[in-house]
Image (cartoon, rainbow, N blue to C red):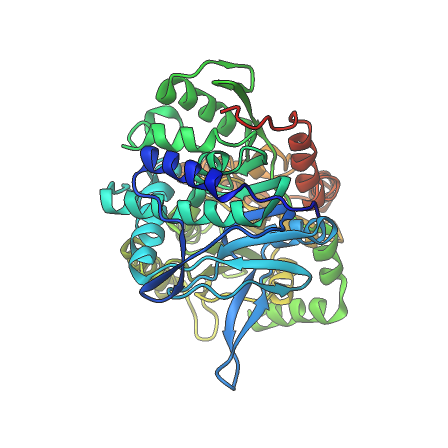
Amino acid sequence: MYGPVAPASDALDKATTSLAARYGTFVCEDLNVAGTTTNRRLTADGYDFVVVASRLPVDRVEDTADKTGWRHSPGGLVTALEPIMRKMDGAWIGWPGDAGPAPEPFEESGIHLVGIGLSAEEVRDFYEGMCNATLWPLYHDVIAPPAFRRPWWDAYVTVNQRFAQAAAEQAAKGATVWVHDYQLQLVPGMLRELRDDLRIGFFNHIPFPGYEIFAQLPWRRRIVEGLLGADLLGFQRQADATNFLRAARRAAGLPTKGSVVHAGARDVRAASFPIAIDAAALAEIARREDVKERAREIRQLLGQPERVLLGIDRLDYTKGIRHRLKAYGELRREGRLGPETVLIQVASPSRERVEQYRLLRDEVEVIVGRINGEFGELGNPPINYLHQSFPRDEMAALYLAGDVMLVTPLRDGMNLVAKEYVACRNDESGALVLSEFTGAADELNGAFLVNPHDIDGMKDAIIRAATVSPREARRRMRVMRRRVFDYDVAHWATSFLDTLREVPEPVPGRA
């Protein structure tokens, strides 16, 4: 770490005043106790590398003694950044995932974790409202209608301020701060005003919409200006980066040249950095005898069908689950698929307090029940529907059990399930049916690409994948596995951070 690094308190006060003028009242506080706040001051030390994400890399668990413990989260972002953070003496700032006080900073798995507290009202307005009912549907091409409510925006500003303040406190002089995802799009700009000595990166894990859609957002200019506080903006696909560049021109009136936005005295680059998985680790799990035995057991429980179709998704309206079920039902009705082909559909719970997600669950379960009622036999339903989450070992066994993986979102930033399936197919068998509206479609050239809105086209692709010759299946899978292993999660993280390090040293006082 560097030596004493935090800006002096008068500099922080000036930056706070500037933020208040731009965004409204700025609270240099953090939620410590439900319903109360305590002032937070900058510390004398800091961290060379700070990750700012909406969630901490651990989940809160209660032990038998009613004491709070923490369980390591298996997310891909954690896997990517954990070794880098240990090497660089990093800190991770995030929300624990429930309403209430922020935990005191603590160490877990060699990482310094700083929790951000949210009140119940902020969970409702920031997380369930602005993030999940406004930005999520808007950024996914308005598959569901977004709602625009000013109290939600006010909460979004307040929470982003809280994250920016925590990052300013934790970062060493000249540190690298990497901010993640659509929940925190104002943080780069706020942090830039608090700490102009930092090198700031931002990565958007979901799509960035075309300007005609983005323009619906009442706060579009504020979002763009917030993102432009970063030195480097990363997106899943080049099309997303291009959409942002257009938004910078149209919403903020800024000139662009190539991949660069000229934001006053600073240049900001927007580029694609497709996110990846820890392919080697997944492949190793899939090689284990207990996992392979579990895959055989799954097929036996299904009645030893000739073919198993597999869908694994969060229960989200962007994932195209209804379209997929419709295609499968029609294939059964037309006799193109018979009882020798069964479908496993895992739909893990997601945002169940949001009304649209509750309605989606009801609709999906009605469709599943209708198909099973029409084509099922005692002990042999055509669709095995599981509204559950599974550990990594069970997921690997499911990937091994599935002959054809169906990944058919209506819109997705990347979709790592497709890459996970490929990584687990060590024998180079299996086939992937993949929506062309995923970032993975740009990389997995061996997949059978589909437009999920085209039900007839999806049906044809499922039949092609289900009847592909073993030789062609191996050829296609070999191409995809090469891509997944060569461009793994470590490559993704290092390529972004290496590009960020190419940014010239920050010049204090340069806005």
Left/right of residue 154 with respect to residue 422 in the rendered view: left
Q: Quadrant of residue 243?
A: top left
x, y (%) of residue 370?
33, 61
Name the residue nearer the viewer: 235 or 459. Answer: 235
x, y (%) of residue 375?
40, 63
- The reply to whether residue 307 is visible in this rendering is no
- Residue depicted at x 42% and y 41%: 13
Is 357 located above or below residue 419 in the figure? below
Is 40 located above or below residue 26 in the figure? below
x, y (%) of residue 395?
60, 62
Left/right of residue 201 with respect to residue 380 in the rendered view: right
- The reply to whether residue 115 is visible in this rendering is yes
Name the residue nearer the viewer: 14 or 276. Answer: 14
Q: Quadrant of residue 189?
A: top left
- Residue depicted at x 61% and y 53%: 91
x, y (%) of residue 248?
42, 22
